[in-house]
Amino acid sequence: MMWLDRVIKSLLPREEHFFDLLERGADCALQSANVLSECCSARSASERQALVSRITDIEHAADAVIRDVYDALNKTFVTPLDRSDIYALATDLENVSDRVHSTMMRVVVHAMEDLPPVSQELAAKILEGCTEIHSAVKLLRGMKRVAEINRHCKAIAKLEHDGDQIFRSAIVELFNTEKDAIHLIKHKEFLEGLENTLDACDDVANALEALVIKNA
């Protein structure tokens, strides 16, 4: 019966606009990474705080994508990819924007006057990872360029690995040199936010790899 169900579904028209929704999610992730990079490159606290409203708008747009995906899944009989895979990937994409937002909010909540020295380097890794994500998601239509998608996923995994090493070294340096406990906590939490965002990028890569294996 399962094979018959697949044959019947293959003959029915499939809603392709799910790829549009996933691309919107990837757009939000890339926009978030760009704003984060600006934040970590900014020269003053006032410049960084001005960027927070921009990241909040992007995070709201990412939330809207999830709502639209959920609504579309409830209204669509045949989807171009497995329903659970679509929702999982959309959620992982939203999580990137969410973690960028959470990280940047620390600038305001903690009234941070400066950022850890390696922030710009980690933000660059995140931006590069989101650029890879953006390119990979755009290749999902038709699932014909699987090797390219896998290359993007491997690049993201390497960025996450390199970022972990930078993060660990920065934490060691922070605890060895920082004498002000409050300053240490602020910087530690900001670095953790950056590292968690890189982890979120790697989650997207894992979701893409799983999706390719199932559908290629």
Image (spheres, rainbow, N blue to C red):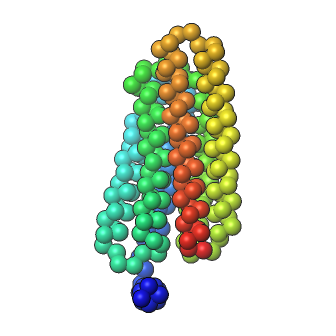
Q: Quadrant of residue 162?
A: top right
Quarter of the figure with residue 50: top left
Residue at point 47% right, 53% down? 92
| Residue 148 x/y as whole percent | 67, 64
Q: In this image, 131 relative to 27: left or right?
A: right
In front: 126, or 170?
170
Vertical side of 3 occupied by 81: above or below = above
State the image coordinates of residue 136 (x, y, percent, origin top left): 60, 61
Residue 5 in the image: state x and y as whole percent. Answer: 42, 86
Please report the residue visible at 34 percent of the width from the left and 68 percent of the height from the top. 72
Tell me what residue is drawn at x 44 percent, y 85 percent: 2
Name the foreground residue: 20 vs 72: 72
The residue drawn where x is 43% and y is 36% is 102
Q: Quadrant of the C terminus?
A: bottom right
Where residue 213 appears, x then y in whole percent? 59, 69
Q: Give the answer, above or below, for where 200 lies relative to 150.
A: above
Number of numbered labels in the structure image: 0
